[in-house]
Amino acid sequence: MNEKLVKSCNDVITTFEKLKLDEYKELNSKLIWCLGSYKNDKDPVGLIETGAMALNALKGYKTKNPRKVNKKIIDNLEKVISGYSKN
């Protein structure tokens, strides 16, 4: 499950970088920081919280720009985040 979280967050980071929008720079930086922190301490809490914020941001952006964000990236992240919230 943690490997899927890392992969999904990496996909989101790549997506934010491709979009090149100022409104997502801070969130992307926080996601990168949490990913690094997770690699050091293996505690996914921060990554899950920031991933959830990124998920909401991507969903909002996709409603306005449906072709600019791959639905699979959103679906994968949503699936992983919801898997953690069930535990």
Image (cartoon, rainbow, N blue to C red):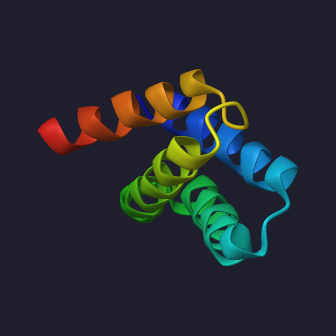
Question: Where is 9 relative to 52, above or below?
Answer: above
Looking at the rendering, which quadrant does residue 34 occupy? bottom right
Question: Where is 7 relative to 34, above or below?
Answer: above
Residue appearing at x 54%, y 30% in the figure:
3
| Residue 41: percent from left, percent from top | 52, 61
Number of numbered labels in the structure image: 0
| Residue 81: percent from left, percent from top | 34, 41
| Residue 87: percent from left, percent from top | 14, 39
**Extreme residue toward the top, this view:** 72
Question: Where is 86 relative to 58, above or below?
Answer: above
**Extreme residue toward the left, this view:** 86
Residue appearing at x 57%, y 52% in the figure:
61
Question: Where is 44 relative to 50, above or below?
Answer: above
Residue appearing at x 68%, y 74% in the figure:
23
Looking at the rendering, which quadrant does residue 10 occupy? top right
Q: Could you tell me if residue 29 is visible in this image?
A: no
**Extreme residue toward the front, this view:** 64
> In which quadrant of the rendered image does the N terminus lie?
top left
Residue appearing at x 68%, y 65% in the figure:
28
